[in-house]
Image (spheres, rainbow, N blue to C red):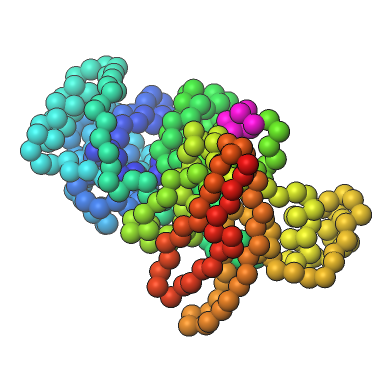
Amino acid sequence: MCILCNFDFNFFIYFTPVAGIGEALVIVALCGSCTFLTSVSLSAIATNGAMKVIWISGGGPYYLIGRALGPEVGVSIGLCFFLGNAVSGSLYEDHTKLFDYIRTTVKPIATILHNEAFKDIMAPLVTEFSSRGPNPISPEILKPDITAPGANILPAWSPLALFSVDIFDKRTVDYNIISGTSMSCPHATGAAAYVKASHPDWSPAAIKSALMTTATIMDPRKNSDAEFAYGSGQSDPLKAVDPGLVFDASEANYEDFLCNEGYNASLVRLISGDASKCSSPGKTWDLNYPSFALSLLDGEEVSATYTRTVTNVGSPNFTYHYEAFLPPPFTVVVEPIVLTFA
């Protein structure tokens, strides 16, 4: 069995079934850089419950211990490990106590206590495995839209689903540690549902706009791909309930977008289910979207005009002012620079 490498723990404990023997306890701790290990023979790391120190290409040393198995068992298992310093100072003493406890206890139990929270100055950071923009099909529509938590999430887990990638692993759990878009997407969906509950009459486009325009701006110095990594920023559902202005879009707006993308009327009708028609072609960036993007070649000079329609969903008597922070090569002119609703 194998799990994704993670940077937050110093060691990892798991049980793996061994035919005819029962469960073998394997602890992995490392001093080295994070990578993936290939399959390792169980007999090489867990015999007679003795401490083993082995070196494997890609880092090390790796400290591994196993419950007594009797004769050598040539069972191959996939191992991954966690980044940590397993051999220095008090941490080494902690590991020694942990190993002693596990080796002398039939059914060792661990308790996870609530620790003191601290602010990680590198957070939020988009993970390396998260997809990046731009969108190669529609480069004038910035993607991704938004960022939501998706690394090391503790979600509910169906007891009918496999606990690990090992098809012979028969354990069932109610919760699991998962990373990926499958975790980030539920966060974004939940945020959208939260906004929808507060504003049942809002369209999907209005809800997306609220989430994007109220997102927490992320630091491009920590995310080298900048907006192509995090989009509008990190989702903030509480702020999204009161965005002030929204960029709404109707079904007709999206039909026009498809026409501008090169779809003919027949194809658009297959999607819309109505008698849609494609009028004179326009620009894909004319879609009333809550972001602006323009693709161009390096060194190319370009000028583009974007038209947007905003809807005031905030205070009926409110004034909005334009403000922008741009790198020196770019110039933006906005008309009007003040919007007043009465």
- Residue that sits furthest to the left in the current view: 89
- Left or right: residue 101 versus residue 144 is left
Residue in the picture at 55% in, 26% down: 158
Residue in the picture at 71% in, 50% down: 249
Query: Which span is picked out in magenta?
Result: 194-199
User: Which of the 4 image quadrants contains residue 81?
Assistant: top left
Q: Nearer the viewer, residue 307 or 273?
A: 307
Position of the N terminus by quadrant: top left
Query: Can residue 14 be spotted in the picture?
Result: yes
Where residue 48 appears, as percent x and y from the top left, is: 22, 30
Q: Nearer the viewer, residue 5 or 203?
A: 203
- Left or right: residue 251 versus residue 308 is right
Query: Can residue 1 be spotted in the picture?
Result: no
Where residue 39 appears, as percent x and y from the top left, is: 37, 47
- Residue that sits furthest to the top in the current view: 106
Q: Is residue 33 magenta?
A: no
Q: Is residue 195 magenta?
A: yes
Where residue 30 appears, as percent x and y from the top left, is: 22, 44
Residue in the picture at 32% in, 52% down: 35
The answer to whether 137 is drawn above or below residue 298 in the figure is above
- Left or right: residue 250 versus residue 193 is right
Residue in the picture at 40% in, 44% down: 4
The answer to whether 339 is drawn above or below residue 189 in the figure is below
Question: Number of marks in the image?
Answer: 0
- Residue that sits furthest to the front in the current view: 342
What secondary structure do most residues of the magenta stretch adopt? helix
Where residue 31 appears, as percent x and y from the top left, is: 19, 47
Position of the C terminus by quadrant: top right
